[in-house]
Structures are given as C-alpha cells and as structure tokens.
Image (tube, grey):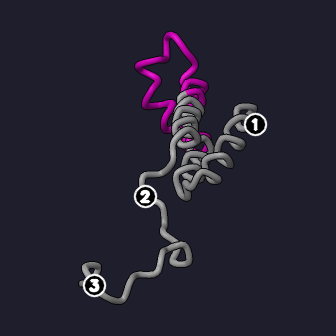
Amino acid sequence: MSLLLIEIPLALLALRRGWRVAPLMLLALPFGAAACESVFAALLGPVFGSYFDPAGTVRALAHGGVLVGLAIAAAFDPSERPVRSSSEKPRRAGSLYQI
C-alpha cells in the first residue's frame, strides 16, 4: 500500500493534464487485485509458486502496471481534448474572397 503514496500524486498529475477516466481506472487496479487475490494467486501459482509467493506477485504486478500506466498518462497529454465553445474564434459571415 505504500506505493499508493506514489500512485496518487501521479494520478492527480494525469488528471490535471487532461486525462479523465484512465487515472481512476488505474488506481482501482490494485484494489481489484487485492479483492480477487486468491483467484489470481491460484492462476499464477503453477507458474510462480516455486519461486515467488503468488499473492505477493499479484500485488507487485498490479502496482507495477499502475505505475507504468500513470507515468505514461502523466507524461503525455490525451490525444483528444474537449473543445470549449468560448475559446473558439467567431466565424466570418461572408465569403473569404471579396472583390
């Protein structure tokens, strides 16, 4: 849970850069992994069971994925930003080619 101290400021930075849903979904990933830890540990048990603790591996993979995703979201602007109508320039009424 101490990695949340790094993840929450990254999520706030990503929200300030214009991301809306991605930081919140990424922050929910460790909580979802903790809720379904036994299911994921049973899936990863045959693969990592002899080397690592499966439950700890699930938590580490969830936090690692969140850190990478939030670092990318905090570093880059979203591809589409909503356009505010007040900042648009007024359109000309007539033709651009006047004689």
- For the point 53% across and 32% down, the residue is 68
- For the point 52% across and 51% down, the residue is 22
Looking at the image, can residue 37 be seen? no
Residue where numbered disc 1 is placed: 5
Which sits earlier in the primary sequence, circle 1 or circle 3? 1
- For the point 36% across and 89% down, the residue is 93
Which sits earlier in the primary sequence, circle 2 or circle 3? 2
The local crowd at label 3, few if under 14, some if 14 to 19, many if 20 or more residues have their Cα within 10 Å, is: few
The answer to whether residue 6 is left or right of residue 20 is: right
Which mark is nearer the camera, 2 or 3? 3
Q: Report x, y in % for residue 54.
A: 54, 24
C-alpha distance separating marks 1 and 3 = 57 Å
Which corner quadrant holds the N terminus? top right
Q: Nearer the viewer, residue 9 or 37?
A: 9
Q: Report x, y in % for residue 78.
A: 48, 51
Magenta span main SS: helix
Q: Is residue 58 magenta?
A: yes
| SS state under label 1 | helix
- Start and end of the magenta stretch? 32-60
- For the point 38% across and 83% down, the residue is 92
Determine which of the numbered discs, if any, sits on residue 80 in the image: 2
The local crowd at label 2, few if under 14, some if 14 to 19, many if 20 or more residues have their Cα within 10 Å, is: few
Amino acid at circle 3: Ser
Determine which of the numbered discs, if any, sits on residue 95 in the image: 3
| SS state under label 2 | loop
